[in-house]
Amino acid sequence: MKKALPYTLMLLAACGAPTEQKDMTAQKIVYPETRKDTTVVDDYFGTKVADPYRWLENDTSAETADWVKRQNAVTQQYLSSIPFRDSIAHRYEELFNFPKESAPYKVGNLFFSYKNSGLQNQSVIYVRTGLEGKDTVFIDPNAVDPKGTTSIGLMGASTNDRYMAVSVQKAGSDWQDIAVWDLQSMKPMADTLKWAKFSGVAWWKDGFFYSRYPEPAKGTELSAASQWQKVYYHKLGDPQEKDVLVWKDDKNPNLYVGVSTTEGEEFATLNVTTGTDGFEQYFFDLRKGAMPTPSTKWTPLQLGFDHKTAIIAFEPKSGKFLVTTDVEAPRYRLVAVDPAKPEQANWKDVIPQKADLLEGVSTGGGLLFASYLKDATTRIFRYNADGSGEQEVKLPGIGSAGGFGGKRADTYSFYSFSSFTDPGSSFKYDYATGKSELYFRPELKFNPDEYETEQVFFNSKDGTRVPMFIVHRKGLQKNGANPALLYAYGGFNISLSPSFSTSRMILLEQGGVFAMANLRGGGEYGEEWHQAGMKGKKQNVFDDFAAAAEYLKKEKWTDTKHLAIEGGSNGGLLVGATITQHPEICAVAFPAVGVMDMLRFQKFTAGFGWVPEYGSADNSKEEFEYLYKYSPLHNIKPANYPATLVMTADHDDRVVPAHSFKFISTLQPAQQGPAPVLIRVETNAGHGAGKPTSMIIDEQADKWAFFFKNIGVVPKYPVAAAH
């Protein structure tokens, strides 16, 4: 959201006395008028459902743009008049301003890493020759786009380590441009591919496979363009119009499809899915030198969308695929599969299912590295290629780790580790000795040793035992009135493990409590845990979240007057459903980029891909009824709602902003209490990824100012920053 002052001037203002600012927040808010169209009514299996704000679904119309402008003006007036808002922004900038560096990505004798000196809008990609070499800039997104709204990422190097594919995404959009760099000259090539989305690159010979959509006709909405995804082969040096069509499906427009190739380019693997749940897995033998065509019959490994079976590697010595699967293993296992006999009856366990969730397996140096989740924290075990010789890799602590993978001939690799108080240290791991060596640890503007993390378990409404992390300053008293933020997601088989957020330090430094609950619908305990929170069982997720809030109150971590709840995307749905079911549960709510209209989500951009998770009101009366029962938009009634700041972005082409537009338009006239219910619409931003640092600082300053204002706590500044 654009501020009234330039950012540098805002920081200067933050150094002044905030009490001199006039507090406009005590005045009654006059919300912008939103036109209602009473003629829009849908019939769902005999039930009439009005949709008076459907016109807001046209987010490019002049009327919608005017509505956004008026809503943002009211929100901005409220936020900018909070006396301590600029002090929060100033402190957050201080906390954020530390050097950040990713673990290296090894390509031959080149090492790539992402670095940010502290406040750069986008991380810069550096490259060095040899691990001890000197870093030079490979790509600086800040030079490409001085506004900082373009994100650039490495997609993968060619098998011979000569070329690098790069993804370019603008204003937070999911749409990708794919570019190619020559690593010999360190210059970009002429190759630029358009209309890719959710695509990787799979190198083979002198080009790569990738997925893209047909170029939309002039004037076509991009939401309508997200259909008929196909696989193409691009030969380096050719214009995109010469790319060869490899795979298509002329019967079903709503499929996601992607191709990978094995390390030695022996096989291409094809993944086809209807959405975010199960997928079909196929493979094609490339060893004869022929490329698949649209008429090629790929060999199936897993048919149907009820399971998740994925080829992760091909082992030339054994002639077998290594495959992760949840077939007969809801917590997953690793199996060996003979490409000549791919039937499930011939699958052989390499790493059998265990009590803990197998999140994934990587290969490197002829070894296997299995990442397990034990009560939502990472455990890493290494094995020989045949699954023998199990050894646990000792991690720095309780948190989240990833990496370890490399090529067969590599002798070492890298991994990263993070926790609620560690923003991400990276380590070099020696395959032969199994020893870890610290590679990079950031210097922070706070002392992480002053804080601690607890893991607790609480019972949900139906008695299910649910885990939750609680982070706070050491020695914090459970006085029943600490400022607290409860965060969760609960969906799509996504596991929440410990992760760092600089923004949370704004809360923790003020004696606050951060809680993260691992709700059903996530993947923390495997597919059974996921299925217990999807489709008709989605209410379990909301019940888990409400039980988490009540636990925090019962155990005197906080109370209703000092509690906020937060979630984004599917988590935004979670927050929206929670406050419509329990308006009294908290003081503040932050639903961000949420799926709020559960009757129409499948009609926009990527929405069709969520039908396996949620169901669809178009499918059956049963699915309509359970969606209608909890849909946040359709369950708003006159009530005393908590202070609510809905957050969305004008370029969000994953969860279109219309969800948030319609939700706040319905919530504002329904608010019976004094608490503000506002919407903050970010411009030139998308679903969340790739935001520039300046935008993040503004957004988080607004969020925490809104939080402290509406729990009646004035944060104490300046916070001692010297540690």
Image (cartoon, rainbow, N blue to C red):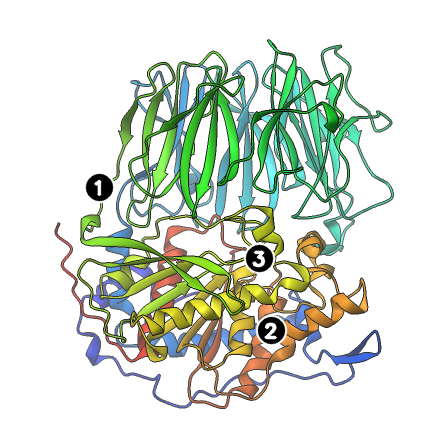
Residue 615, horizontal then vertical, whole percent: 72, 60
Q: From the viewer's perspective, is residue 333 above or below residue 689? A: above
Q: From the viewer's perspective, is residue 581 above or below residue 599? A: below
Foreground: disc 1 or disc 2: 2
Residue at 72 percent across and 78 percent down: it is 51
Foreground: disc 1 or disc 3: 1
Q: Is residue 81 visible?
A: no
Q: Which mark is residue 443?
A: 1
Q: Is residue 230 left or right of residue 61?
A: right
Q: Which mark is residue 271?
A: none
How far apart are labels 2 and 3 at the CA level?
22 Å
Q: Amino acid at mark 3?
A: His
Quadrant placement of the N terminus: bottom left
Say which label, 2 or 3, has the lower sequence index.
Answer: 2
Residue 210, horizontal then vertical, whole percent: 67, 31
Q: Secondary structure at mark 3?
A: loop
How far apart are labels 1 and 3 at the CA level?
34 Å
Q: Which mark is residue 632?
A: 2
Along the viewing direction, whichever of 327 and 245 lies nearer the viewer: 327
Q: Amino acid at mark 1?
A: Glu
Q: From the viewer's perspective, is residue 11 above or below residue 666? A: above
Q: Are marks 1 and 3 in contact (CB under 8 Å)?
A: no
Q: Secondary structure at mark 1?
A: loop
For residue 399, which quarter of the picture? Answer: top left
Q: Which mark is residue 651?
A: 3
